[in-house]
């Protein structure tokens, strides 16, 4: 496994890979957990040449404290990736990725107008800035993203097509702890009491999916209110939003009958830690 800290050294490592090989790419912000490792393992099903980046992207943070407190565990991350026999780990500095201020703005086709978008202005534009930059550097054939960040995944699919990147975006299922909690680097910021409270999030989503499958009489709006009330029963949690959206447009729906693909998405605060999750309803 080769570890690169500069674009120059990365290009040298990339050129040493077998000629015309297909590269699988897993972009991360580090603090790797089993969810990230599952992306690496999925990538290895597509190709033997897997590149993982570790870069905490400042352009996608709205809150400077959130950026400062984001967990960083580079040594442990590299040990995990070496165990997985990753080909190259790219750990660039901010100056390497952004040698000058990135002022690009992208047309996200309204995919950022719901969910995380209003709560985190500019967040998804920052995500696209770094992903497009990394795609230009890594030049992958495949890129792997988790469905936990469902809205981000939809936006990356959109922009990859819009900018004509020759990259196949592979969606990977959300990896969960035994109690259903979605794996996230932010989980390590939770107090033991907060962590003990968080299973109610997925329990509420799963129950909502059961209710839809059983063709309950709740409208989408009523079901959103019900899920919100269930999560908010836990005093250590505060629901920021619960939205039931069309899986393709990410716009809120008003009826079940007019949509073939439907997703329930939520953001929940546990103290200062913000957790997101989602589940397919239809």
Image (cartoon, grey):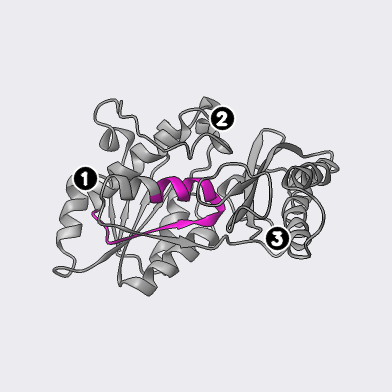
Q: Residues within 10 Å of mark 1 (few under 14, many from 20)?
A: some
Q: Secondary structure at mark 2?
A: helix
Bounds of the magenta segment = 139-157
Q: Left or right: where does residue 164 sit relative to residue 223? A: left
Assess whether residue 156 is covered by the magenta stretch.
yes
Residue at 61% over, 46% down: 245
Q: CA distance from mark 3 to mark 2?
A: 27 Å
For image coordinates 28% across by 32% down, the residue present is 98
Number of marks present in the image shown:
3
Q: Residue furthest front?
A: 258
Along the polypeptide, which appears first: circle 2 or circle 1? 1
**Mark identifier at residue 7:** 1
Q: Which mark is residue 118?
A: 2
Residue drawn at (58%, 51%), measured in percent from left and top? Answer: 184
Dot 1 and dot 3 residues touching (CB under 8 Å): no
- Front of the two marks 3 and 2: 2
């Amino acid at each position: 496994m080769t570890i690169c800290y500069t674009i120059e050294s990365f290009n040298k490592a990339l050129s040493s890979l077998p000629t015309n090989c297909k590269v699988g790419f897993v972009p991360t912000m580090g603090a790797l957990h089993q969810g990230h490792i599952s992306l690496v393992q999925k990538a290895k099903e597509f190709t033997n040449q897997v590149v993982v980046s570790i870069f905490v992207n400042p352009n996608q943070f709205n809150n400077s404290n959130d950026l400062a407190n984001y967990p960083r565990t580079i040594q442990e991350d590299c040990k995990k990736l070496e165990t997985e026999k990753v080909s190259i780990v790219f750990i660039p500095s901010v100056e390497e990725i952004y040698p000058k201020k990135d002022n690009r703005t992208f047309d996200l086709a309204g995919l950022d107008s719901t969910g995380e978008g209003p709560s985190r202005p500019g967040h998804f534009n920052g995500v696209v800035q770094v992903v497009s930059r990394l795609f230009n550097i890594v030049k992958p054939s495949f890129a792997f993203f988790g469905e936990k960040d469902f809205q981000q995944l939809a936006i990356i699919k959109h922009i990859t097509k819009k900018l004509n990147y020759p990259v196949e975006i592979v969606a990977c299922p959300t990896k969960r702890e035994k109690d259903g909690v979605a794996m996230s680097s932010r989980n390590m910021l939770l107090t033991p009491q907060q962590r003990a409270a968080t299973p109610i999030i997925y329990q509420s989503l799963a129950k909502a999916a059961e209710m839809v499958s059983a063709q309950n009489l709740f409208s989408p709006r009523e079901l959103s209110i019900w899920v919100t009330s269930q999560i908010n029963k836990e005093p250590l949690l505060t629901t920021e939003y619960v939205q039931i959206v069309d899986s393709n447009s990410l716009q809120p729906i008003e009826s079940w009958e007019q949509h073939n693909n439907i997703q329930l998405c939520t953001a929940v605060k546990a103290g200062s830690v913000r957790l997101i999750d989602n589940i397919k309803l239809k």
